[in-house]
Amino acid sequence: MAYADQEMSTRRVVSLGVVALLHAGMGYALITGLAYDAAKQVFKDLETFDVAEEEPEPEEPPPPPEKLDIPPPPKVTAPPPVVKSSVVSENTQQVVITPSAPPAPPPPPPAPPAPPPPPAVVKAQKAVAKGNPANWATTDDYPSSAIRAEEQGTTGFRVDVGPDGRVTSCQVTSSSGSSTLDEATCRLVTRRARFTPAKDTTGAAVSDTYSNRIRWVLPE
């Protein structure tokens, strides 16, 4: 590029020098009395003289960039598509795994058998009251509250007699209609009644029951 500019400047200087020489010659011709035609011819030649400027040479394209040896990217192979099929081969057995249930607790041990009832005692002799049962409750034992309420009647009772001949419990089997008289009956019989205990076939004293009634009559 610099060489082309320098060559163009040289040509311009040469052209300018030629023009200057032509002007000098024309002046010299005028001075020396050259003919007008010669001067006209010179001017004509000057007008036709064309200093053509050479076009600059095209610039050379820049060298292509160096190619780097870059390895090609690895090829990624897609996995084969998964084909879901609802068809189950006849020879294929489907195994279904279910969570195992917790073991059942062991059954409770069987209840022990009920003890056999005691053998019935064969009484050879029943319990017999000692003394007169009428003395177990007398008029003097009449409750004062029953007298004021004018309560009277007959109370039936049953007592349990132990092997020692004493009353262990008392139950009212028929009420006199007065709870006061019924309670007084069991209280007096339990405290006063005595028995000859019952005996089994071996002659041993055993428990027994005894039943009777007490009639309550208001004192006069």
Image: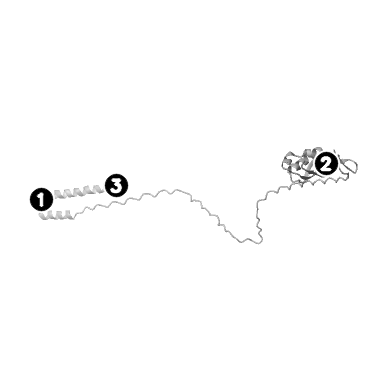
Q: Are marks 3 and 1 in contact (CB under 8 Å)?
A: no
Looking at numbered disc 2 in the image, what kind of residue is underneath it? Ala
Upstream in the sequence, badge 3 or badge 2? 3
Give the number of the mark in front: 3 or 2: 2
Front residue of 82/186: it is: 186
Upstream in the sequence, badge 3 or badge 1? 3
Q: Residue at the location (13% across, 50% down)? A: 26
Q: Which residue is mark 1?
A: 30
Which structural element holds mark 1? helix
Q: Residue at the location (17% across, 50% down)? A: 19
Choose top left, top right, bottom left or bottom right for residue 180: top right
Q: CA distance from mark 3 to mark 2?
A: 172 Å
Q: Which residue is mark 3?
A: 3
Q: Residue at the location (25% across, 49% down)? A: 8
Q: CA distance from mark 3 to mark 1?
A: 41 Å
Front residue of 139/210: it is: 139
Which structural element holds mark 3? helix
Q: Which residue is mark 2?
A: 134
Instruction: Please tell me how crowded label 1 is: few (under 14), some (14-19), or many (20+) other residues with Cα within 10 Å.
Output: some
Upstream in the sequence, badge 2 or badge 1? 1
Q: Is residue 86 left or right of residue 211?
A: left
Q: Is residue 77 left or right of residue 202?
A: left
Looking at numbered disc 3 in the image, what kind of residue is underneath it? Tyr
Front residue of 56/131: it is: 131
x and y percentages locating residue 149 in the rendered image: 72, 42
